[in-house]
C-alpha cells in the first residue's frame, strides 16, 4: 500500500493561519481580560451574569479538567494515523486554546504529533 504525503494547498494554509490567529487571540482575551483580570473576576464571583462571566466559567471548568489538552492529544493521534485538513484544524483549535489556557503539557505534545502528521516515507526513486 502506497502512502502519499500529506500536503496542504495554499488556501488550506491560509485557512489554518486564520483559524490559528483567531483561536489564540480569543484564548488570550479570555485569559488576560476575563480570567486573570481581578475586577472582572470579582464581578463574576459576585454573581454578574454576562457573556464574559459565562465564558470565564466555562473556560475555567474546561482547563481545570485538562479538556483542551486531552482533546488536542486525541485529535493529534487521529491526525497521525490518517491526516486530513479537518483533523488538523480541530487539533490546531484545541491545542491553541490549551497552550494559552494552562494545559501546556498535553497541548505541546499534541502540537508535536500534529507536525508528525506531515511525515510520510519518501517516494522510491528508480
Image (tube, grey):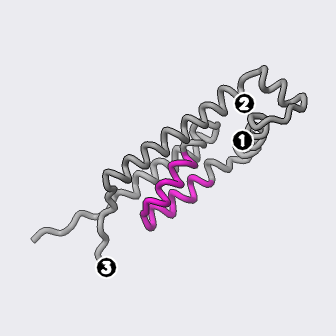
> Neighbour class for label 2 at 10 Å: few (<14), some, many (≥20)?
many
- Residues under labels 1 and 3: Cα distance? 43 Å
Residue 42 lies in what quarter of the image?
Answer: top right
Task: Note whether 106 is above or below 35 in the view shown.
Answer: below
> Neighbour class for label 1 at 10 Å: few (<14), some, many (≥20)?
many
Horizontally, is 40 left or right of 22 in the view? right
Residue 32 lies in what quarter of the image?
Answer: top right
Dot 3 or dot 2, earlier in sequence: 3
Dot 1 or dot 3, earlier in sequence: 3
Residue 111 badge: none
Residue 54 locus on image (x, y percent): 78, 40
Looking at the rendered structure, the secondary structure element under dot 1 is helix
Query: Marks 3 and 2: which is nearer the front?
Result: 2
For the N terminus, give its image quadrant.
bottom left
The stretch in magenta equals: 71-95
Residue, x 40% and y 58% (percent of image)? 117
Looking at the rendered structure, the secondary structure element under dot 3 is loop
> Neighbour class for label 3 at 10 Å: few (<14), some, many (≥20)?
few
Residue, x 49% and y 45% (percent of image)? 19
Residue, x 86% and y 31% (percent of image)? 48
Residue 1 badge: 3
Q: Which residue is mark 1?
A: 59
Horizontally, is 108 left or right of 45 in the view? left
Residue 35 badge: 2
- Residues under labels 3 and 2: Cα distance? 50 Å
Among all residues in the image, which is located at the extreme left?
126
Horizontally, is 105 left or right of 119 in the view? right
Tags 2 and 1 in contact by the CB under 8 Å rule? yes
Dot 2 or dot 1, earlier in sequence: 2
- Find out whether residue 84 is within the magenta segment: yes
Amino acid at each position: 500500500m502506497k502512502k502519499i504525503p500529506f500536503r496542504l494547498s495554499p488556501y488550506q494554509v491560509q485557512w489554518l493561519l486564520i483559524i490559528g490567529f483567531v483561536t489564540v487571540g480569543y484564548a488570550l482575551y479570555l485569559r488576560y481580560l476575563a480570567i486573570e483580570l481581578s475586577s472582572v473576576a470579582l464581578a463574576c464571583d459576585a454573581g454578574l451574569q454576562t457573556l464574559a462571566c459565562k465564558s470565564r466559567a466555562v473556560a475555567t471548568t474546561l482547563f481545570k479538567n485538562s479538556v483542551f489538552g486531552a482533546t488536542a492529544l486525541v485529535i493529534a493521534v487521529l491526525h497521525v494515523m490518517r491526516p486530513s485538513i479537518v483533523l488538523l484544524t480541530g487539533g490546531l483549535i484545541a491545542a491553541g486554546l490549551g497552550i494559552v489556557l494552562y494545559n501546556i503539557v498535553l497541548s505541546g505534545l499534541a502540537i508535536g504529533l500534529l507536525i508528525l502528521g506531515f511525515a510520510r516515507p519518501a517516494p522510491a526513486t528508480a
